[in-house]
Structures are given as structure tokens and as C-alpha cells.
Image (cartoon, rainbow, N blue to C red):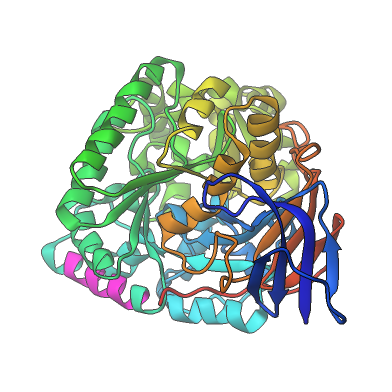
Amino acid sequence: MKLLIKNGLVVDGSNTKPYEADVLLENERIVEIGAIKEEEGYKVIDAKGRVVCPGFIDTHSHSDLKILENPYNEIKIRQGITTEVLGQDGISMAPLPKEYISSWRKNLAGLDGVSDSIDWEYETTDNYLAMMEKGGVGLNEAYLVPHGNVRMEAMGLEDRAATKEEIEKMCEITRREMEAGSFGLSTGLIYIPCAYSQTEELIEMCKVVAEYDGCFVVHQRSEADTILESMEEVIEIGKKSGVKVHFSHFKVCGKNNWKYIDPVIELLEKAEKEGIKVSFDQYPYAAGSTMLGVILPPWAHSGGTDKLIERLNDPEMRAKMRYDMEHGIPGWDNFVDFAGMDQIFVTSANTEKNQDAIGKSLVELGELRGMDPFDATFDLLRDEENAVGMVDFYGLEEHVIKFLKRPEQNVCTDGLLSGKPHPRAYGSFPKILGRFVREQGALKLEEAVYKMSKKAAMAMNIKDRGVLEAGKFADIVIFDQDKVCDKGTFVDPIQYPEGIDYVIINGNVVIEEGNYHKVKAGKVIRRS
């Protein structure tokens, strides 16, 4: 079938001036762009007065588990996302040795949710991707090797440095998972067990990734007090391994640390001058979201979630956790310090008895339970077996804009999909187009589209997507530039955006005049 998009304003993803043209698709590819005569048998979409651009690429996604339960992922598609990158923050679905399934599911729950409906005995990335391929996917899915999963397979979940032999094992596993089609290595150096690693471990693993022209996608050790030292570590890894470096959800957290905003930009520029390829992604909100368990000191998680629960049941261990949260540990990003108990809000919980905690700050949680907020938080994490999500407020919109305008930047959602999520899960890309292009004028339209498409594809080394060009895959968004906007708020985040009129994935019309068609139009993309 041939599909002709007529009369649209083409913003092709290459950061060049928009132009009026028609776009002809056949099957899953773009055939021609220009003045195209309509022929018999064509399906025609009249895009007059609307923008036609490449499908958006979400370089930081947490749909890893949800996509197996609900392959359609309407939440992402309705904001124009046609490709997303899974395997983020160093903790994801695969690899997963059978002996760690129970513990790992609990460790993963705060980010990716819980499920009893899937078969968890897939073991490797190849098998995990094959599960998605067999079930079908609504949009295109790419995968990064998660450092924590690799470390777990090589040496378990203990809080210690890896031996030379264990690092060699990690490199072997990384190679196996890159061969399965992963696009790079991710780590989350505030998450367990990634936080227990030393720099040398990551350098050696990244040497393997560099052989495949993959990227090192990193939630760095600090986005707060020690962010400069943290960035220097990541840059050292890039320099010594030769890997491309991509910082996840780039930001500086906490009012006391805003003084580091210009110095971190200087470090980015210094790395570029030294020949290190550096990029970063960013969601357009001055608040973050992750698993609530990260507010606990790293030692509390040693050995996995079952050990954590034992410590949460021990009054002496609770007292030690509280002391560290109130006084800090050198080099540890202390959310209670930079955000505050009153600016950390519960977004998800699994058990019925704790549904009333959702939407409450940790201070409000203490009031609700009639106890000290630390104890109320410890009880919540214990009773939910660490499967709790949170939102934390850390910055200002002017900081968002400053990073948004950087040449290294591309857009992401970092969307956690459980409970009452951060509004970024539903609205990141439309917010860029509505708030920061139309209302603020912080970016030109063509710059914003570039950062949401081609720039993202380049950062992850995804081929044949992210640009409107003959021969490329037909991932296309048609939107109303005057109406596009996000609708979700932190109070009421579960709202679809407006103004995204058409979404086409691999030549299949999935959103049509704002109406969603439940189609498994995506592909599992393996690095080739």
C-alpha cells in the first residue's frame, strides 16, 4: 500500500529550515519527498497547516517489563514516540540468571513495576528480545546491556570491588549481550549493585562496548554535591576505553549545587576538545522520578532486597540509616539532603493497604501514619518490599532551558509507568513543542525536532530512523504546531497530550486524527 501525506510543513529532522512538501510511503519505507502527484489507489492524508516530521526517539525509557504485559504502549505513542531505548540505569530485565530471579524482581520493581504474568526464566538478552519479537510491540524497541545485571551474573549482589577474574567475566557477558544486538552499556551508579563498582571495572567493560561502536549510557554517581568529581570519572572512562559517553537525564540537583551548572558545562566542552564523544538526554521538567529506595544509604541494599528488608526490621539498622540520611556519606547523592522529605512524593505502591500513600510527601506520609516520617518511610519500603516509586523536586525551569539549548542534548522521558507517575511519562515531547518552542521560543521548531529525532538516533547509533529521507523507515509524526502541548500535572499526571494528530510507525498509521489504533506496528531493533 502507498500512503501519501500531502501539503504538510516538512521538518525533516536534520535541523534545517522547514519546507512545504508531500511525503510518499510504501510499506514500511519513505519512497519520495517533494511535489508528488496523487495516483489511484493511494491512501491520502491531508496535512495542510500541520507539521510533518520524523517519529520521536525516547533514549531513556523504563517500559522494559510493561512492554511484555502490554505491548502497545499507547502512553508513549500518543506523544509521538515511535522508538524507545530500554535497559536503562544499569538495572533491567536481562541478563537474569535463574538463581537471582526472586531477588532481582524486587530490586527492579521500583523502576519497572511488578508482574506475575510473564515467564521470568529467559536468562539472556537474546531470549528477552525474542520474547518481545514473538509477542509483538507497538513501537520500535532498542536495548542497552545493563551493568547491574552483568555484575550480578558475574559476582552476585555483594557490596565489594570486583576481582580481576570477575571483571573478565563481566567483559565476557557484555560481549555476549552486545552480540545479541544491544546498542551499548548502561549503568546507574546510585543503584544496586552498580553503585558498588569501581572505575576500572567500567573502563574494561566499556572497552568491549567500544569494539561494537556502542555507547556508554550513564546515570552518574552524583547529580548533586560531588557532580564535578562524578563527571570526571565518566570522562576518564570515555578517554581510557574509547567509548562514546552519553549522560542520562542530565541535571544538577539541589539549590546548594546550582553553582555547579556552568562548571559541568565546561567539563562537557573540555571532554569534546579532548576527542571524547559526549552527549546527554534530558526530560523537560525540574523534578525527577525514580525508586524510593535510593534515599537509603547504599550499604542498606547490600546482598539484595531480602537483606534490605531484614535491615528495615532491625531498629539499630534503622537508626544507622537515619543517621546517614541526616548527615550524609561522602560521594553519595543524598536525596533527603538536596530535595528534602517535604519535596519527595510517593508515586506508586503495590499493596492495597498503602494506596493511600500515593501522592503524599514523606512528611505527609508520617502525618498520615501518625509517626516520624523516617519511620513511616522505612515501614513503607519494608511492607512493599522496596517496590515504591517517587518524585523529587530539585531545580528551576531556567536550568532546564539552559541544558535544553546545549548541542549535546536530546530529549527523553525517563518515564516510569506505574501508579501515579511523573507527568514526563505522558508529556515530555509535546511539552518541548508547546512550552519551549511555541510559548518560550527557547528553541526553533527545527532545532526541537532534531533533538527529538536525528540527534537521539545519532547518540544511540540507531540506523535508518530519526530523519525524513527516501529509503528510511516510515516513522512519522504529524502535529498541529498551534495546539500541541502536554496536559499532565504532578497532581493529575495521567493525561494524554493534545495536538499529536497522526503517528505512523513502520508505515502503519497508529494515531489517526487523534484516535489510537491498537496495532503492533513496531520492531525489536537489534544493533547490526
Does 438 sit left or right of 120 as displayed? right
Residue 172: within the magenta? yes
Dividing the picture into quadrants, the one containing residue 471 is: bottom right
Dominant secondary structure, magenta: helix
Dividing the picture into quadrants, the one containing residue 472 is: bottom right
Q: Residue at x 51, y 55 (%)?
A: 454
Which x, y percent locates residue 510?
A: 78, 66
Which x, y percent locates residue 288?
A: 55, 35
Hey, which residue is sitting farthest left in the picture? 164
Q: Is residue 154 above or below residue 271?
A: below
Residue 527 visible in the current orientation: yes
Which x, y percent locates residue 256?
A: 40, 15
Q: Residue at x 53, y 21 (%)?
A: 398
Does 192 sit left or right of 44 as displayed? left
Residue 505: within the magenta? no
Q: Is residue 2 above or below residue 425?
A: below
232 and 387: which one is in front?
A: 232
Residue 380 visible in the current orientation: no
177 and 355: which one is in front?
A: 177
Quadrant where the N terminus lies? Answer: bottom right
Q: Which residues are magenta?
A: 167-177
Which x, y percent locates residue 219?
A: 39, 45
Does 339 sit left or right of 238 as displayed? right
Q: Residue at x 49, y 24 (%)?
A: 399
Does 311 sit left or right of 240 as displayed? right
Quadrant where the C terminus lies? Answer: bottom left
Q: Residue at x 74, y 44 (%)?
A: 353
Q: Is residue 109 above or below residue 364?
A: below
